[in-house]
Image (cartoon, grey):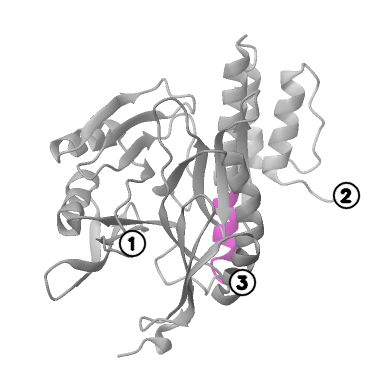
Amino acid sequence: MHKRSPAVQLDRAIDAMLVALRPETERHTSPALAQLMPIARALSLLPRPDFKLALKSDLQRRSSMTESAARTQVSSGTAHFRRPGFSNIAPYFLVNGASKFLDFLISAFEATEHIRVPRPDGSIMHAEVAIGDSDVIELADANEQYPPRAMATHLYVPDADATFARALQSGAIAIYSPSDEHPSGDRWGAVRDPFGNVWYIATPRGWEPGPEGLRAVQPYLHLRDAHNLIPFVEAALGAEVLGIHKSPEGLVMHATISIANATLEIDEVRGETLPTPAYLHVYVPDTDALYAQALRAGATGVTPPSDAPYGDRTATVKDPFGNTWFLATYRGANQIKP
């Protein structure tokens, strides 16, 4: 019998629990699932249906993050399509005043500057910083082709309160202070930086990251008709949904999506929240194949595949939701042009 993934095992167990059935016994239960189920059994007795849905979504998210990290760890020896040290889907910030934005990232989030490529006029053509052990954020000064966009990003940090305080001291505005009341169960706060970007600042509560450490940076897309993005990225980019929580009306309240073993999060815009189209840089096994696949799935080509002087095979597409995807395949240091 084919062994079910931990995410599928968890989904079946939670579904059975919430309708008062005895979960089917799995012959090869995931260790992560075994750790999470006692918590789920205790909390599932709470009466609120919305809490049960949030609980199920959160456990799916945590299990899927563990599963994704494990897959990344197993495949890291063969994932030669990534530039060394670039393991996440990187949010690419195009802002007016990129130098000041870079200073903000360093001050607020203790980012480490790795690359800064200036233009002759002093503006930034491209820069990279790392947050956490290795997760990359990219940035540049906006231009006519790529205008500024206010984006949303989810950060996992060791101390949400300390990071929140540093962000305010660095010029951010509080949206809400860190608390333990977030549906995920994590300690969670949010700020808006001086450039209009939203940062969700969280520290895990009640679960421990795997041996590979915490995924510090994840793009977070607020979308209209978010459920329609899922079949698009599945068809265009070979994406996999790791965990999804929908409202009774079918709206996506939260979903975690993996592309080439790197993740992003999405949800449906609600209340006063506006859609946040993003610039996203993702390494894929074959840029040419994914570019053609994305166009067949409904994306618009921005720049066709070509060899970049820094050793990547690159292309750019824009999806029907307004997000711009910078696709790249690392071709090796010997492909770097002087």
The residue most toward the top is 47
- Foreground of the two, 264 or 322: 322
Residue at (41% x, 43% y) in the render: 276
Using the rendered image of the protein, determine whether residue 106 is visible from the camera's viewpoint. yes
Q: Position of residue 10 (x, y in %)?
A: 69, 35
Work out how far the residue at label 3 is from the one at label 2, CA to CA, in angstroms. 36 Å
Taking 107 as reference, is 329 above or below it?
below
Marking on residue 1: 2
Which of the two discs, 3 and 2, sits closer to the camera? 3
Instruction: Identify the main secondary structure in magenta.
Output: helix
Spatial CA span between label 1 and label 3: 22 Å
Q: Which residues are magenta?
A: 67-78
- Residue at which label 1 appears: 146
Choose the circle earlier in sequence order: 1 or 3. Answer: 1
Q: Residue furthest front?
A: 144
The residue closer to the viewer here, 325 or 202, is 325
Element at badge 3? helix
The quarter of the picture where the C terminus appears is bottom left
Q: Residue 34: horizontal and vertical position, in percent?
A: 66, 34
Residue 43 on the magenta span: no
Question: From what the image shows, is residue 31 above or below residue 211?
Answer: above
- Residue at x-position 39% and y-position 27%: 272
* Rendered view: 37 above or below 263: above
Residue carrying label 3: 292
Task: State which tag comes first along the sequence, 3 or 2.
Answer: 2
Q: Is residue 71 above or below residue 269?
A: below
Mark 2 residue type: Met
**Badge 3 density bin: few <14, some 14–19, many ≥20, Cα 10 Å:** some
Q: Going by the image, does 193 lie left or right of 12?
A: left
| Dot placed on the residue nearer the N-terminal end, 2 or 1 | 2
Identify the amino acid type marked 3: Ala
| Closer to the camera in the image, 49 or 292 | 292
